[in-house]
Image (tube, grey):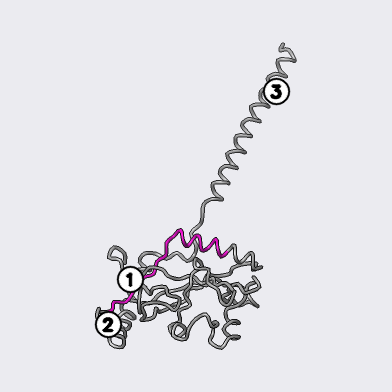
Amino acid sequence: MKRPTTIISKILCLILISSIIGCNQQQKKKKDEIIESKIVKAPDHIISLKQADAIYDNYSQNRVQIIEDYENQKRPSEEKFEASRFVDFDYETLKQYMAYLDQEAAAAGVKKITKLRLYFANYPNEENFSNGKPVIHKRQNSIFMVPTLDDGGINYGFFIGENGKAELIKDRKANTKDGLGNHLNKKENAHASFAPTFTLNSSLQGSKSLAFNFGQGGPPPKTDF
C-alpha cells in the first residue's frame, strides 16, 4: 500500500505540470494575439497592377495629347512641352507631414482629421513664385494636399487661424476680397498656386497653412507603367 505522502506528492506534481503547461499555452496565445494585432490588413482601396495599368493608359490616351497640344500651341517655348505623368513625395517627408497634421490638429481642437484631400494644380509659366521660391516645373500639372474635418456632415479643408483654432478654407475665401488674403499677389492667385508647404511655416496674415505641395514630377519612369 502506497503511503499518503507519496500519493500527495504525485498529485502536487501533476498540478504543477498542468499549471506550467497552462501558463505556456496562455503565453503562446497572448504572443499570437500580439503578432496578429500588429499585422496591418490591406485597405479596400488597393487595386491590382492590371487596373493601375489600365487607368494609366486611359490618361495617356484621353488626356496627355490634349495637354501637350495646348502647351505647345498656346504657351510655346524653346523646348517641346512633355506632360507630366506622375507626382511623387519623399516617403519620410510624408510621414513627417502626417505627424505634423496630427500635432497641429490636436492643438487646434480638431477631434478628427477626416480626409486628406488632393487638389489638381498647374504651376505658372514663371521663373519664381511671388515669395522668390523658384518654379522648378514650369507649366506642369501637380497636386497639393489639404486635411479636412467634418462640419455638419460635410468634409471641408481647414487651416490654423490666428487664434490657434481650426478654420475652414471656404470661410477664409468667402471673407476676403482676393480669395485667400493679401499674402498672394494677383498673378500667383491667377495660377492657383496655393503651394506653401508645412516646412515653410507659411501664414495667412498670422494663420498657418497646412497645404502640402512641391512633389517631384515628370514624364513616366521607363521602368513603371
Contact flag, marks 2 and 1 (Cβ < 8 Å): no
- The answer for how far apart the CA atoms under marks 3 and 2 are is 92 Å
Specify few, some or many for label 1: CA neighbours under 10 Å numbering under 14, 14-19, or 20 or more. some
- The answer for how far apart the CA atoms under marks 2 and 1 are is 17 Å
Q: Which residue is disc 1 drawn over?
A: 218
Specify few, some or many for label 3: CA neighbours under 10 Å numbering under 14, 14-19, or 20 or more. few
- Of the numbered discs 3 and 2, the one sitting upstream in the chain is 3
Determine the image quadrant of residue 86. bottom left
At mark 3, the secondary structure is helix
Q: Nearer the viewer, mark 3 or mark 2?
A: 2
Determine the image quadrant of residue 180. bottom right
Q: Nearer the viewer, mark 3 or mark 1?
A: 1
Image position of 43 (left or right of 26): left
- Of the numbered discs 2 and 1, the one sitting upstream in the chain is 2
Q: Which residue is disc 2 drawn over?
A: 77
Toward the viewer: 19 or 160? 160
Q: Which residue is disc 3 drawn over?
A: 12
